Amino acid sequence: MKPGKLTLPELAAMKSRGEKIVMVTAYDAPGARLAEQAGIDILLVGDTAGMVVLGHEGTVPVTMEEMLFLTRTVARTAQRPLVVGDMPFGSYHVSDEDAVRNAIRFVKEADADVVKLEGAGPSLSRVQAIVSAGIGVMGHVGLTPQSETILGGFKTQGRTASKARQLLADALALEAAGCFAIVLEAVPVPVAARITESLTVPTIGIGAGAACDGQVLVYHDLLGLTEGRAPRFVKRYANLADEIRRALTTYADEVRSGVYPAEEHTYPMPADELELFSQSVLTDGQAVDRRSQTDARAKLARPDTGTASGASAEGVEHAHGDR
Ligand code: KIV
């Protein structure tokens, strides 16, 4: 473990003290660096990467290899924040053994501190198995995007009394299975509040209101890198898409008009070295010139090459002009 790393007992203590936990997704080294400098507690290398980085419509197509690659870049950079590797669809759905094997890959190959997986029910034995292998697990209930099709899309969960009871039961079961924290996504505020007070481990809300012990947002959403209609819970703290587009447009204009690069973007050369360089190029140029003339004369002396003497001279001219 890196020195100064936020530990799981410290996270639990934050809940006891009523100190809010701040989590954001991160998918690369600059994102991890900036988030750490901003004092973020937890970096989730979320499978939302599928949508905001990899260009998919949802999270289901994301592979283990892609998640390991992204997690590695974040873990390499982050010192204090806890780095959570999000287990992608299919990496824990088949068996407990598979889940443990893939969780170990996150820790061993990508240097994640802990992993996250979605759902309760069949995920409970996965959580138990991974925790037994010595790896911390963050749970995730409510809107679980990997089950988008079964849930009927990205929709609020737990809006009926029976579904809310089920959510509470799922969260309690995940805590009993060994989760150190649980993400509540797109859950009505009173339900999230009830779950939060019923659990001893922290809840991290996304679209679940302020009663949760912490909050998470997707990096690209909060910075305004994603465009179009955002989910209701997203607050844009910046509009980087506009800023980036403006910068790229100006760059393109300046390259095309010759404004960029200006002298200050270029490397100078000592005047004496430049003089030597110019002289030597001139000398080389004369040598090349002489070689070309010799070649042309040789061709003229050998008409059997099939080249007319006039055309040959033109060819020499042309080749010379090309240099
Ligand atoms: O993958 C992800 O980014 C997530 C958050 C939205 C909680 O699971």
Image (tube, grey):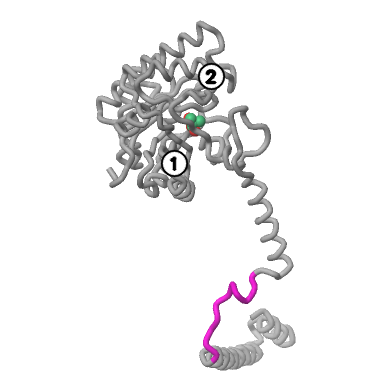
- Residue at horizontal 58%, vertical 42%? 223
Q: Nearer the viewer, residue 4 or 78?
A: 4
Quarter of the image with the N terminus is: top left
Q: Nearer the viewer, residue 318 or 1?
A: 1
Label 1 secondary element: loop
Magenta segment includes 281: no
Q: Is residue 54 left or right of residue 107?
A: right
- Residue at horizontal 33%, vertical 37%? 113
Pointer 1: what residue?
A: 40
Q: Nearer the viewer, residue 65 or 32?
A: 32
The kind of residue tagged 1 is Ile
Q: Position of residue 69 (x, y in %)?
A: 42, 43
Q: Earlier in the sequence, mark 2 or mark 1?
A: 1
Q: Is residue 66 left or right of residue 315?
A: left
Pointer 2: what residue?
A: 189
Label 2 secondary element: helix
CA distance for labels 2 and 1: 23 Å
Instruction: Specify the principal SS of the magenta part.
Output: loop
Magenta segment includes 265: yes
The kind of residue tagged 2 is Val
- Residue at horizontal 66%, vertical 68%? 260
- Indicate the quadrant where residue 89 lies: top left
Residue 102 seen in this snapshot:
no
Q: Position of residue 309 (x, y in %)?
A: 71, 87
Quarter of the image with the C terminus is: bottom right
Number of marks drawn: 2
Number of residues whose C-alpha sits closer than 10 Å to that of mark 1, classed few (under 14), some (14–19) or many (20 or more): some
- Indicate the quadrant where residue 57 lies: top right
- Residue at horizontal 40%, vertical 14%? 121
Number of residues whose C-alpha sits closer than 10 Å to that of mark 2, classed few (under 14), some (14–19) or many (20 or more): some
Q: Nearer the viewer, residue 86 or 40?
A: 40
Range of magenta residues: 261-271
